[in-house]
Amino acid sequence: MGNPDEQGPVEEQYLGPVVRRRSQIKPGTTDQRLLDSEGDSEWVHTDPWRVMRIQSEFVEGFGALAELPPAISVFGSARTPEGTPEYEAGVAIGKALVEAGFAVITGGGPGAMAAANRGAREAKGTSVGLGIELPFEQGLNEHVDIGVNFRYFFVRKTMFVKYAQGFVVLPGGLGTLDELFEALTLVQTRKVTRFPIVLFGSAYWGGLVDWLRDTVIAQGKAASRDLHLFHVTDDITEAVTLVTKEVSG
């Protein structure tokens, strides 16, 4: 037998930037597959189609939020009960941020997020909720004036950072910690600059700060200067001043 590469020219198919040869060639053209209404619908679950969905989420998010005034993202637990000190602190922080000239962005859910949105709405400011598709999600809270729902966490995270000038982090669970450490990593690696992060509630966050200092930093996994990436306070006025001073300063 001769060398297969010497048996004449190789058949090729060009599909946009993709080249297919030999057994990988697909029948028809891209236009034919687009216009053909018959056949398997499995294509809507493929990775190339997901890329289009991801792109559309970025486009919708950018379009909805591009004209926001300066904003602060407020995070906290969806399980914070209404009427508790934590909830009331969220309301007060939302109001104070609006009075300082900022829109308020939250994850759009209940609990601490609803509290911050409520404070912003009651202060007649811009109240934004960025929701996420989850099996147990309850939808956007009633205090959201501009809401965008996302399928993908990473697209939503981009919106939190891109359209906010800082974070206020109320006591929260794994989702709150996820957003907090995402922001800390972006600041530490200088992917974003001048991005203040305020943790509200020293009793709640104190153990985490102690662990960062006494374990993570003590074992050389982070630098002591990383403790300066965030502030901890129990005072609402101070929280708002810290998160907005660095923005305007």
Image (spheres, grey):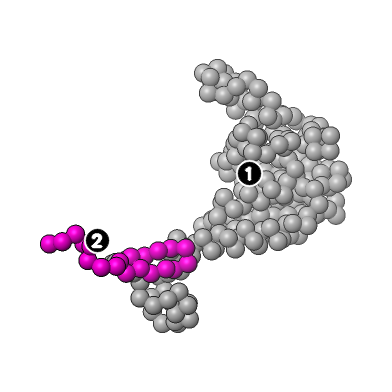
Up the image or down, 95 lies above or below 135; here it is above
For the point 60% across and 22% down, which residue is it?
223
- What x and y, as percent, mark residue 153? 56, 51
Residue 209 visible to an observer of this rendering: yes
* Residue in the picture at 64% in, 38% down: 191
CA separation in Å, label 2 and label 1: 62 Å
The three-letter amino acid code for the residue at tag 1 is Ser
- What x and y, as percent, mark residue 167? 71, 40
> With 4 as the anchor, is 34 left or right in this view?
right
In this orientation, which residue lies closer to the viewer: 35 or 66? 35
Q: Secondary structure at mark 1?
A: loop
Q: Which residue is mark 1?
A: 77
Q: Position of residue 26 (x, y in %)?
A: 35, 71
Report which residue position mark 2 lands on. Answer: 5
Q: Which residues are magenta?
A: 1-21
Residue 86 makes an appearance in the image: no
Q: Quadrant of residue 148?
A: bottom right
> Can residue 109 be found in the magenta stretch?
no
Q: Nearer the viewer, residue 150 or 54?
A: 54
- Please name which of the two marks, 2 or 1, marks the residue nearer to the observer: 2
What kind of residue is marked 2?
Answer: Asp
Q: How many marks?
A: 2
Question: Are there few (<14), some (14-19), or many (20+) residues within 10 Å of tag 1?
Answer: many
Q: Residue at x 15, y 61 (%)?
A: 2
Residue 145 placement, left or right of 224: right
